Image (cartoon, rainbow, N blue to C red):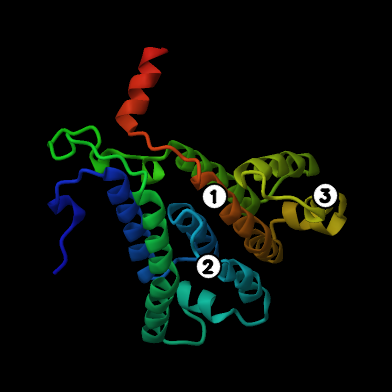
Amino acid sequence: MTMSSAAFENYRPALVTLHNDIRDLKDEYRGGLRSQRRLLTWLQEITVRTIGEIDAQVYEDLPRELMGEKLGMFVVASVRPHEGIDDERARRGRELWLTEHVTSAYQHAFRTLRTSATEYVDSAEDEDAHAPDKQSAVAMRPSLREWDQRQATALTDLLDGFDEREEISRWLDDVIMASYGEASGAWMRELVRDEVAVEILCGQAAKHERARRILAADKLLPNFRRGIRKLANNAAEVADAETESKEAQFA
């Protein structure tokens, strides 16, 4: 039997929040994800919560895993129902992947944040405003929460598709912001200029949705990872209660 973080007095809630958020996402993944789309959104979420510490090779391999006639083993093991392997083999594969990639990334993220984690002397009180379960920001860093939301929105917009070329242009501006300026290059211009690309981004057929998932894996997630790594270096810790107090002062 393991003890929950709630069983301890939490004086550095940012680290507990980090721990709890990653644990929840790991638990979801252990059960298998419901779709390839959820795999992409789950990777975006875990990337932010590990402040970009997951191995870059994961992001380099993912487009190839999605692109072939047969899905790669990581995708097959991650998404239910599993194609070509039994549930037990898929379960072992997921657990191994979590241990190899997410657990080590969590360790690196923890070591990065522990030096700046604030200690709150009131953190053991029942009504403590700094309690981990009262925090909405990733590791109590509002800028990480903001970029998590920006990335999630940009990713969802791509997966949903667009109505017209003008929407694609506006979305590319959002991608630059969501990637903390890391997204760049000819591929962004081609998405607006190339008619085939516009058809893929605006189409609603299964082949268009598949192509958008591959594009998300190839261009968005790697740039999102790089952006979060840069952002995390300067992200400051603020408790939700303190943020609300500052907002009230200027209201």
**As shown in the figure, which amino acid type bears the numbered disc 1?**
Ile
Counting residues from the N terminus, which is met first, the one under dot 1 or under dot 3? 3
Q: Residue 228 carries which label?
A: 1
Say left or right for 99 vs 128.
Answer: right
Q: Which label sits in the foreground, 3 or 2?
A: 2
Residue 129 visible:
yes
Q: What quarter of the picture does the C terminus occupy?
A: top left
Q: Position of residue 152 (x, y in %)?
A: 54, 48
Residue at numbered disc 3 = 189
**Front-most of residues 205 and 18:** 18
* CA–CA distance in space, label 1 to label 2: 13 Å
Residue at numbered disc 2 = 55
Say left or right for 47 vs 61.
Answer: left
Instruction: Identify the secondary structure beneath mark 1.
Output: helix
Instruction: Identify the secondary structure beneath mark 2.
Output: loop
* CA–CA distance in space, label 1 to label 3: 23 Å
Is 22 situated above or below 227? below
Counting residues from the N terminus, which is met first, the one under dot 1 or under dot 2? 2
| Residue at image coords 25%, 40% | 119
Q: Residue 85 carries which label?
A: none
**As shown in the figure, which amino acid type bears the numbered disc 2?**
Asp
| Residue at image coords 54%, 66% | 36
**As shown in the figure, which amino acid type bears the numbered disc 3?**
Arg
Crowding at mark 1 (Cα within 10 Å: few <14, some 14-19, many 20+) = many
Q: Position of residue 62 (x, y in %)?
A: 60, 70
